[in-house]
Image: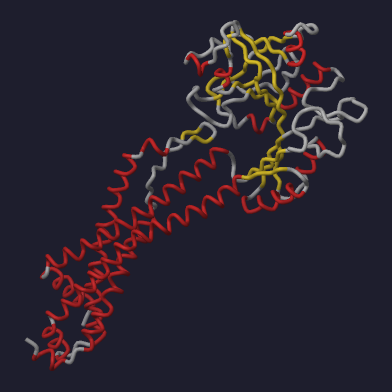
Amino acid sequence: MRFSDLLRMSLSNLWRRKMRTFLTVLGVIIGTASIVVMVSIGIGQNRSMMMAIEQSGSLTAIEVNNYQYYGGNNSDTDVLLMDLDMIETFRNMEHVTSVNPSLDYTVIMKQGAYICDYVRLRGVTQEELEKIPLKEGKLPDPNANTPTTLEFVVGNNVITDFYNEKTNEYYWQTGELAEVDFMNLPLFTTFDRDAYWNAQSGQGDPPKKYMLKASGLVEGGVEDWNQYSYYVYCDLNALESVLKQIYRNKVIPGQPTQKNGKPYKNFCYETCVINVDKMENVNDILTTVQEMGFSAYSNVEWMESMQQSSRTSQMVLGGIGAVSLFVAAIGIANTMMMSIYERTKEIGVIKVLGCSLGNIRMLFLMEAAFIGFLGGVVGVGLSYAISAVINRLTSGMMGDYSYYGSSVEPTGISYIPLWLTFAAMGFAVLVGVVSGFLPALRAMKLSPLAAIRNE
C-alpha cells in the first residue's frame, strides 16, 4: 500500500469520527498550551535576569576592591595597596584586555542657596567615560587638568543630594528639586573638606574655592536609575593632576602615607575594573586576583547561580505543564484503542486482501500522529495568545531595562522562543505516536478470520 493511500485512509478515519477526534485533539491542545506557557514563564524570567545583569555591568568585566585599604591615611607598608604598579600587574595578566582604575574623592559644591557637602567625584579612564550615556553636553576634556578648568559629567540623581543651606531641606522632603544649573552656571567647589568643616566651627581659615562648570549631564531624570546616577565623573589623570596641585606635596585625604608621614609615591585606588577577552576566562582571572588578596567580583558568578535557579524553575514549571500532556496521551491511547474495537472487521478485511502488518501499524500510528500534530499546532497558537495576555497584565512588573542608556525592549514575564514552538509541536506529535503504538500492535496481532467474523 502506498504512503499516499495510508495518508488518505488516516484522514478519512479521523474525519468519520469528528466529535471523538475533536475531543481528543482538545486534550492535546490544552496539554501543549500548558507546557509551552509554563516553560515560557521560566524563559521570560531568565531573560529578565540576564538583562538585569547586563545593565549592572559587562559579563567579561571583573570589579576589584581593596578592602584592606579603604580610604584614610595608612602608613602600614604590609597593607596591600592597589597602586599603579599593581594596576600594571593586572594589565600583564593573560587574557586581560584592559584595566580601568577609578579614584573617588569627596568634594563640596555650592550654587546659590543650595549646597551638597558630599559630592562623590569619581575619576575614571577615557574608556570608561565613553560608556556614560549623555543627555546633554559632552565628555570632560582630559587636558582640563587644573583646579580652575577641571570638567565633569553630573549623574542624573546628583541634584537630589543638594539641599537648601538655609532650611536644610532636601528634594526627598519637599518634592522640589534644588535650583541648580549645572550646565550654565559655575559651582563653587571645595576640595579640602576637613579645612572647610574646621572653618565652619571657627578653627582655622576657610579653604580655597574653585569655580567649576559641568561639561555634560547623564541621561535620565531623578526617577530613573543607572550605574552613573549618583556620581560626578571626570578624567582620572586630570583629577590626579588637580589633587597634586591643590595639596602640593602634602598628604591627600584618602591616600596612604609612608612611614615617615610623607605622601605615598603613587596614587592608590580602592577599585578598578579588569576587562577580560572572553567570558570563559573570567573565572580564572577572578581566582588569581582573589588569591593575591583583593576582593573581586564578576557578574559571571551571579549569572551562573541565577541560571541554575532558572533551570530548576523551568524544570518545575515544565513538569507541571507535562502533566496535562500526559493526560492527553492517555486520551489518544483510549481513542485509538476504541477505534480498533470498532474497526475490527475492517482490519480483518485489509489483512485478507494482502495488506502487510507494517502498513497496518503505519495506518494507526499516522492517525495518532495527526491527532498530536493538530493538537500541537493549535496548542502553540493558543499558548502565544495566553502569553500575550499574561505579558499585558504584568507589563508593569518586569520594568524597562536600559543598558548604558540604550533602551532595551522589556522581555515580559512570558517569552516563547522559536525553538520552543517547534519543540512543542514535535513533542506533541511524538506523544501521539507513542500513545498510538500499543493500539497499533494490537491491530497487527488481530486474527484475520476472527476479525472478519466479528460483528
Image quadrant in which the N terminus is located: bottom left
Quadrant for residue 445, please give it: bottom left
Quadrant for residue 338, please give it: bottom left
Q: Is residue 446 above or below residue 176?
A: below
- Residue nearest the observer in this picture, 358 or 159: 159
**Seen from this angle, which residue lies furthest left?**
455
Position of 53 compared to 45: left or right? right
- Residue nearest the observer in this picture, 435 or 258: 258
Residue at the spot 13% in from the left edge and 92% down from the top edge: 450
- Residue nearest the observer in this picture, 91 or 120: 120
Quadrant for residue 85, please give it: top right
Position of 284 compared to 409: left or right? right
Position of 29 compared to 267: left or right? left
| Residue 81: x %, y % from top left | 80, 37
Count of numbered marks: 0
Q: Is residue 387 above or below residue 135?
A: below
**Seen from this angle, which residue lies furthest right?**
260
| Residue 45: x %, y % from top left | 44, 47
Residue at the spot 23% in from the left edge and 84% down from the top edge: 442
Q: In this view, does 221 lie above or below 411?
A: above
Position of 290 compared to 33: left or right? right
| Residue 183: x %, y % from top left | 58, 13
Q: How is the image coloured?
A: secondary structure
Residue at the spot 17% in from the left edge and 64% down from the top edge: 23
Image quadrant in which the C terminus is located: bottom left
| Residue 432: x %, y % from top left | 28, 70
